[in-house]
Structure formats: structure tokens, C-alpha cells
Image (cartoon, rainbow, N blue to C red):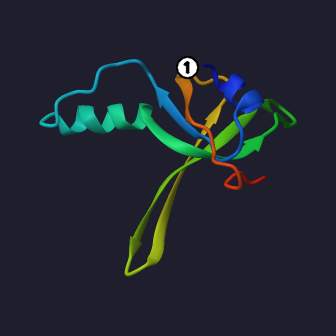
Amino acid sequence: MSARTIIDTAPFGALIRYTDGSPKPPARFTKKLADWERSNGVGRLVKREPPRPYATWTAPASFTLHEGNFSSDGVILVTIMRSHSTDSALAFDVAEEPKPGQQRVA
């Protein structure tokens, strides 16, 4: 699926998988693995943004995925969010639909 399809059809709270189609490198190649992980992952759809016109250009429509939290002693210290625009070359897939009552509007 394209990013546009995710924006148009995926419900909030859906688990979205994204990939660049490349195979995962072995763990011993730490830099290659880190690069691969930036283009291949999964997150929950939490936000949609329409195109935004500016004086000199127009920002494309986008959506934001919540990828996780880092916490200590029950306190969330860092929240990982990643935004993707409609001009993204990545392939997207709805990995899981939200359960009834789990869906929220952003």
C-alpha cells in the first residue's frame, strides 16, 4: 500500500507496518542494521495531517505512527513518533485493525 492509501483508509489505532523492501542485515553489521531499522518498522496510527500550503511550497499530506515509549520506574521518559508523507517511497501495510473500543480520534 502507498502512504496515501493509509491516510485514506486505515483507522486510528491500526498497527501499520512499513518497509523499504530490503532484507534485514545480520546483527554484526550494526550501522547497516540501524539504517535498515529506520526504513523498516511498525507503529500505531495516531495522527493524520492534510496538505499544508506555504508561501513558497506545499507540504504533502502525512500521518504519524507511535512506535513506542522508553520508561523508567513507570514514568515515560521518551515517546518515539515517526511521521511519513504521501511522497514516501516506503511500502505500508495494515498489520492489525484496532479492537472495538480501542479506536480514538486524533
Which residue corresponds to the image point at 44% horizontal and 22% vertical from the top-left? Answer: 20
Say whether residue 15 is visible: yes
Which residue corresponds to the image point at 47% horizontal and 39% vertical from the top-left? Answer: 42
Q: Position of residue 88 (x, y in %)?
A: 59, 24
* Residue linked to disc 1: 89
Residue 55 versus residue 47 in the image, above or below = above
Q: Viewed as shown, does residue 104 lie left or right of 97?
A: right
Element carrying mark 1: loop
Q: Viewed as shown, does residue 73 lie left or right of 17?
A: left
Closer-to-camera residue (36/74): 74
Residue 24 versus residue 99 in the image, above or below = above
Closer-to-camera residue (94/63): 94
Which residue corresponds to the image point at 26% horizontal and 35% vertical from the top-left? Answer: 33
Closer-to-camera residue (9/39): 9
Residue 30's quadrant in the figure? top left
Residue 19's quadrant in the figure? top left
Residue at far bottom of view: 73
Residue 20 versus residue 39 in the image, above or below = above
Closer-to-camera residue (78/102): 102
Q: Viewed as shown, does residue 87 lie left or right of 34?
A: right
Q: Position of residue 48 (x, y in %)?
A: 74, 42
How many discs appear?
Answer: 1
- The crowding category of the residue bearing disc 1, from other C-alpha atoms within 10 Å (few below 14, some 14 to 19, many at least 20), is few
Say whether residue 60 is visible: no
* Amino acid at circle 1: Ala
Residue at far front of view: 100
Q: Position of residue 61 (x, y in %)?
A: 76, 32
Which residue corresponds to the image point at 41% horizontal and 32% vertical from the top-left? Answer: 40
